[in-house]
Image (cartoon, grey):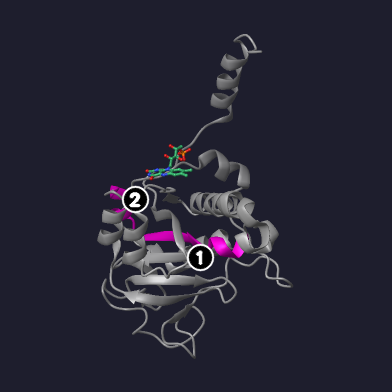
Amino acid sequence: MGAAGASFLTSGRPRAGGRAGGAASEILLPIPNLVGSMSVEEALSRRRSVREYLRSPIALSELSQILWAAYGVSEVRWGLRTAPSAGAIYPLKVYAAVGEGGVVGEGGWLEAGVYRYLPRRHSIVLLRRGDVRRGLYEAALRQDWVLNAPVSLVVAAVYEKTARVYGERGRIRYVHMDLGHLGQNVYLQATALGLGTVAVGAFDDDGVREVLGIPEGETPLYIMPVGRAADLHRISREELAEYYSRNRSAPLAP
Ligand SMILES: Cc1cc2nc3c(=O)[nH]c(=O)nc-3n(C[C@H](O)[C@H](O)[C@H](O)COP(=O)(O)O)c2cc1C
């Protein structure tokens, strides 16, 4: 592991999990794990919006897993994804704003910057160099978790892709339903890895666009800061049973 500031892109040899042979700015991510140590029931019960993170980086393998959970390929004939999408159109784009010393791989630190996730290659491409977290925080109405998280995913939509097929219904319903599925995948995967995230919808669209360099035709919808959770929420079956019992003892509302 190198010192913070040393660059993953400028250290190590081109290989899987390092630079791609062809493009200097493409990072091939490790192949995601398909088996984990937390059940879906446990992840559901422990998921919370987490707004405080330890001051430690996340691993490149964790970023890889989160991106795959968000919008990765889980079927290879048609390239279907981990998240359902109306008409399998996949109108969403996933960006990662990586802070200085925010993500560490076996070959060193991932260079701070803005990356775009390429689901079919399971890679990220560097679009903009430098730590943009302060700009993103300003655009996100100064929500501290956007400044403090080692990395933030930003999800943008190309409304036209879905609207072309489904018209207004696609534009005002389906794209947002797609986003919700992606968002929940990120929440659950983060929880299963001992990481935390929060879906942030309150921000200045043009500000986020500018900070990330999001192209025309894409609308940012979510910022999802990701960091190591200081503490994961926990609830016991007994607590749940007691809660339901209390509510069941009240008269049934008509
Ligand atoms: C569409 C949407 C927008 C949200 N925007 C923000 C936000 O801007 N900032 C924030 O801190 N949390 C935001 N949240 C998180 C909610 O506050 C959170 O989900 C809610 O309080 C319930 O808590 P839980 O996620 O821990 O169950 C948003 C959630 C959703 C679904």
State the image coordinates of residue 8 (x, y, percent, origin top left).
36, 78
**Mark 1 / mark 2, whichever is N-terminal:** 2
Total marks shown come to 2
Corner quadrant of residue 19: bottom left
Q: Tag on residue 93?
A: 1
The answer to whether residue 98 shows anywhere in this view is no
| Residue furthest top as drawn | 251
Q: Which residue is mark 2?
A: 53
Q: Would you call the spot at circle 2 few (<14 residues within 10 Å), some (14-19), or many (20 or more)?
A: many
Corner quadrant of residue 120: bottom right
* Mark 1–mark 2 distance (CA, rounded to whole Å): 25 Å
The answer to whether residue 177 is above or below residue 156 is above
Q: Is residue 149 within the magenta segment?
A: yes
Q: Nearer the viewer, mark 1 or mark 2?
A: 1
Q: Does residue 175 appear left or right of residue 87 in this picture?
A: left
Q: Does residue 107 appear left or right of residue 246 in this picture?
A: left
Taking the image in four quarters, ligand 1 sits in the one at top left
Q: Is residue 179 within the magenta segment?
A: no
Residues 53 and 180: in front is: 180
Residues 73 and 219: in front is: 219
Identify residue type, mark 2.
Tyr
Identify residue type, mark 1.
Lys
Taking the spot 51% from the left edge, 65% from the top edge, the residue there is 93
State the image coordinates of residue 249 (x, y, percent, origin top left).
61, 10
Q: Which residues are magenta?
A: 143-162
The answer to whether residue 178 shows anywhere in this view is yes
Residues 139 and 169: in front is: 169
Taking the spot 53% from the left edge, 63% from the top edge, the residue there is 158
For the C terminus, the image quarter is top right
State the image coordinates of residue 95 (x, y, percent, origin top left).
44, 66
